[in-house]
Amino acid sequence: MIPAFEAVVFDLDGVITKTAVTHAVAWKKMFDEYLKKREGEHNEPFSEFTQADYLAFVDGKPRYNGVASFLESRGISLPRGTPEDSTESETVCGLGNRKNEAFNEVLKRDGAEVYPSSKKLLSELKEAGVKLGVASSSKNCKAVLEAVNLLHLFGARVDGVVSAELGLKGKPEPDIFTKACEILGADPARSIVVEDAVSGVQAGAKGKFGLTLGIAREDNPEELLKNGADFVVSDLEEVNGMKGLDQLFLKFRGK
């Protein structure tokens, strides 16, 4: 079959790979260690970094923006610093680099796992000649895709590294998704965004994509729908392959 859409742009963590859990663990390790340090140095009562904090302030955002957003929620003000800051620097970028170090340690130790339904749909779309892109805030996107042998499927990769090089705004702005479409030579109105983060579905809606499909990995379908998802599933298995995806696109296109 020839689908009505011409491209699909996937988020990585929580959509293609199960690395969202790895990121959440790395964020918690870094923030809890820092907050305990502040308790000793500034006499601030320790309050742990929670999953609710991860979803509200960090999930889907560029790393340093996530650090700044969470610190602001706790009333903590630090210098921004620069991406070159060491992991010992008490700056937003320094803390972000500590988190990245923790993530890479876990990735090296445990590897990455792919959602079977996502891999199956990617293969079906690729075989049908659909243009595929991956858009992620992570600077580890390429390393993760190489680790699971999926990098070759994508005609466009717009991640944290590319965003920094091009000066693109992170989610919830649509820049990384629209840039992926530009690289693919696809019209966002005839393309689909697949996301699991609130900031990601907000970006899909702002970018006026033909369909923004949410995946409720955190049992949060209502929140995803409220923030811009046209349709929400708990796993891509529920979509029923390319045929089902095409039906959803036709249903919501021009909404």
Image (cartoon, rainbow, N blue to C red):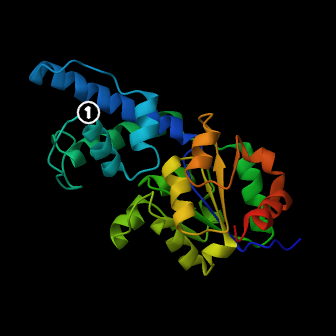
Q: Residue at x 16, y 52 (%)?
A: 81
**Quadrant including the N terminus:** bottom right
Q: Amino acid at mark 1?
A: Arg
Give whichever of 199, 62 is nearer the camera.
199
- Count up the numbered dots: 1
Please say whether residue 108 is visible from this viewpoint.
Answer: no
Give whichever of 144, 62 is nearer the camera.
62
Q: Is residue 44 left or right of residue 115?
A: left
Q: Vertical placement of 166 versus 113: above or below?
A: below
x, y percent for residue 190: 69, 74
Q: Residue at x 19, y 36 (%)?
A: 76
Circle 1 is placed at which residue position? 74
Q: Helix, strand or loop at disc 1?
A: loop
Q: Residue at x 52, y 40 (%)?
A: 20
Give whichever of 90, 226 is nearer the camera.
226
x, y percent for residue 188: 61, 73
Q: Is residue 92 left or right of residue 135?
A: left
Give whichever of 48, 209 is nearer the camera.
209
Q: Residue at x 40, y 43 (%)?
A: 58
Please say whether residue 51 is visible from this viewpoint.
Answer: yes
Q: Vertical placement of 208 versus 232: above or below?
A: below
Residue ranking furthest to the right: 1
x, y percent for residue 249: 76, 64
